[in-house]
Image (spheres, rainbow, N blue to C red):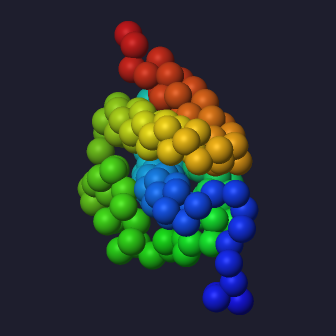
Amino acid sequence: MTGMAIEIGIDDTKRKEIAEGLSRLLADTYTLYLTTHNFHWNVTGRMFNSLHAMFMVQYTELWNAVDPIAERIRSLAEPAPGSYAQFAKLSSLADAPETPPRAEAMIQILVDGHQATARSARSLFPVADEAGDQATADLATQRVAVHEKAAWMLRALLDE
């Protein structure tokens, strides 16, 4: 199977380039998932109930996003990264702090994470467009919308 030609209408160079971008998006998504889940477990303070529930909705959405991203990479006949070491190298996000921060700092970290992940998704558009890869462009469009909305909702919590 590995020696079979990949004839999907995207040349090998573009497939690899798109898969690399998707791998960065996967790493950002997984890192943001883990951070959001961490904050769900460790949030305290006056906003506990609302943040605990909001973080659960957000980490569930992120968890459900990693598989389609990884499967798109595999559809392009490239290996999907799947280790913490690979994600650490590929992600534009910092790991969650070892000591849980206060709720407001958690919110800001997640705002920054969603904005960075939206940028990672958006960076896929030029190469996907050039390669005629509508499937990747569609996936990136969906991810940009999710991350921009999550960042907006989190930012709203910081307005006073």
As drawn, 155 above or below 126: above
23 or 9: which is nearer to us? 9
**Within the image, what quadrant is residue 87 found in?**
bottom left
Q: Residue at x 57, y 26 (%)?
A: 149
Q: Is residue 83 visible?
A: yes
Can you give x and y, in whole percent of width and height, for residue 51 in the image? 52, 36
Exactly how many numbered labels are in the figure? 0
Q: Is residue 60 visible?
A: no
As drawn, 6 above or below 155: below
Can you give x and y, in whole percent of width and height, for residue 33 in the image? 51, 53
As drawn, 60 above or below 87: above
5 or 28: which is nearer to us? 5
View extreme (top): residue: 160
In which quadrant is the N terminus drawn? Answer: bottom right
Can you give x and y, in whole percent of width and height, for residue 55 in the image? 55, 42
72 or 98: which is nearer to us? 72
**Is 115 displayed left or right of 50 in the figure?**
left
21 or 93: which is nearer to us? 21
Can you give x and y, in whole percent of width and height, for residue 92 in the image? 33, 50
Q: Residue at x 47, y 58 (%)?
A: 17
Q: Residue at x 29, y 45 (%)?
A: 101
Q: Residue at x 31, y 65 (%)?
A: 89
**Within the image, what quadrant is residue 96 found in?**
bottom left
In which quadrant is the C terminus drawn? Answer: top left
